[in-house]
Image (cartoon, helix red, strand yellow):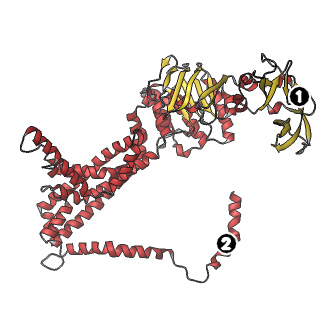
Amino acid sequence: MASAAMAAPPKKHPKSPKSSGSRPRIPTWAWALPPVAVLGLVFLYPLALVVQQSFQPDTGGTSLQPYADVLASPSFLEALRTTVWIAVAATVGALVLGFVLALVIAFVPFPGGKAVARFIDVFLSFPSFLITLALLFIYGTVGMANGLWTDVTGAAEGPFQFLTTPWGVLLAEITYFTPFVMRPLLAAFSGIDTAQLEVASSLGARPARIVRQVILPEARPALAAGGSLVLVLCLNEFGIVLFTGAKGVTTLPMLVYSKAILESDYPGACVVAVVNVLVSVGLYGLYRVVSRRAGA
Amino acid sequence: MSGGSGIRFDRVSVAYDGTTVLDSLDLTVEPGEVMALLGPSGSGKTTALRAVAGFVRPASGRVFIGDRDVTALPPHRRGVGMVVQQYALFPHMRVEDNVAFGLRAQKVAKGEIRGRVAEALEMTGMAAYARRHPRELSGGQQQRVAIARALAIRPGVLLLDEPLSALDAQLRSGMLAELSRLHRELPDMSILYVTHDQIEALTLADRIAVMDKARLRDVGTPRELYRAPRTAFTASFVGNANLLPVTVGAEGVAFGGTELKVATGDAAPGASATLCVRPHLVGLGTGPNQVAGTVSEVQWRGATHRLYVDVAGHRVMADLRELREPPAHGDSVLLHFAPDDAVLLSAGVTTDG
């Protein structure tokens, strides 16, 4: 084999460069130009405009004044805090719930298991506000759950009022983003040799030990991938927060929206947007570092 | 787990989606015995092993390990060692942690684990590789680690599911010798060895259970099954065989008009039967029990020549020590075999004619 492979190329080699003719060859890096141009035009240029705007207060000139104003405002700090904790909590929740659900779908044989796995794919294509809307129907102030309660007890209000609180946003985000974790996990689980699980149990390991010591280590890269994706998506989530109608829950994207559209404070909105991008990139980077150190 | 438990299948049937994959298996593996389950794929042999390990639940019947009825026990409470074809080592654990896995799962005292891991690795010749990861080992080394991992828990019963199929021929014969040695060192451990390879079964097993189409066809020592097969299936699956349709006569059998002297046992004269003659026991030229035929094909296999000879409309195989001047296609030849080298299959006798 090896000698045949070594012998073959020299025959063709002297001829192949000439057969391409005298046309000048396009350097490899040139192929990168069109995508970079498109990327720059539709993505980087608008981003640069946003950054530029954030340094131009309404009073004219270029200064750090918008940053000083926004960073000092309590509403911004509150939004920053809310955004980060909801995103982190939603990511943790989606990871835990997604891991458990994927585990069941992948390893517990039940009728319709394949259909459920297929449905996960469809779920990923749903718009995020759809989930919130569905939750509103069930848990909203005049939703099914509260309706049932008031019908049965005759009370004026139902007990489910959490949807307009941060907890409602958290519930909606976990519900919506869990499939994003399950997708890579199911792919990782399908790569685990079931013989490993069988041998582990014949060696005396109970299911909990098998999950912890055999499945979890092999799922770590998938957890890292799914988790980082969900974290970034949660930090920038807008539709869910808007649709829960949670007035008290202001996240950074909501703040951008209210500054830009409601208050016409463009520099302020751009400052918040820039901060939002920095937080996303920063947390994402931190997550990658941590998960890599954890052996992913 | 102390050694010497043995395995007993008591009318064990297994069905998947209405298809019976194992049909009322009755089989006992004695303590310390090596039993090979030999059969083609789909014969139910792997299902039988999985029923012992606890990965399939019998539709009916009971499985015993020692005198414990384990039919309803989950796999982790059965205390069997298992080695599978594709090794199934835990990829993210070092060799020593793979071997220690079962001991930790069974809550063996920390101080004892180190010694037992070392002992198991020593036994399989892998002591020098304790700190490696599975991906840094060759296939044969990985299989040794898998065996060490199974032995570390000191099981009374070791289940081997086609353990050598993924190895190349040379490694396989080395590992066969290793497995025999391990069994000599652990004489109390019963071994259930699933294979489709007759050489592995003949080499290693104390007894062979021949399986086909979800049923047990034959059980016996390798020598019994090879020298005196009961059925045509056993004859052709354990070794090669010429299966000749014959009519039982007074002092032998008639094959295509030729009288052959063989022991007929208690078969009644006039009955039709099947005569089994091993190809390597067939000689070329004149001799006792000779038949005439035409060479239809000659295969040179290095050490031997395989002749296919048409005798009275039947194809007879003869494996002959390499011939200086082999006969050519179409030549007329004489074949012969000693009366002792032929066996009348007892299960194939029918007294309709």
Q: Amino acid at mark 2?
A: His
Observer-nearest of A248 and B327: B327
Q: Position of residue A295 (x, y in %)?
A: 40, 48
> Toward which corner of the image does residue B286 lie, by quadrant?
top right
Secondary structure found at label 2: loop
Q: Which residue is mark 2?
A: A13
Q: Is residue B257 in view from this perspective?
A: yes
Q: Residue at x 19, y 47 (%)?
A: A138
Q: Amino acid at mark 1?
A: Thr
> Toward which corner of the image does residue A129 lie, by quadrant?
bottom left
Please identify the residue farthest to the right as the structure is shown.
Answer: B286
Q: Position of residue A250 (x, y in %)?
A: 16, 58
Q: Position of residue A235 (x, y in %)?
A: 25, 58
Q: Residue at x 51, y 43 (%)?
A: B133
Quadrant assignment for the C terminus of chain B: top right
Q: Is residue A14 above or below residue A184?
A: below
Secondary structure found at label 1: strand
Q: Is residue A68 in view from this perspective?
A: no
Whole-number angstrom distance, CA of label 1 to CA of label 2: 70 Å
Which of the numbered marks, if any, corresponds to residue B342?
none
Q: Which residue is mark 1?
A: B258
> Toward which corner of the image does residue B196 lie, by quadrant?
top right
Q: Residue at x 36, y 72 (%)?
A: A39
Crowd class of label 2 (few under 14; some 14 to 19; many from 20; radius 10 Å): few
Count of number-bearing discs: 2
Please identify the residue farthest to the bottom as the structure is shown.
Answer: A22
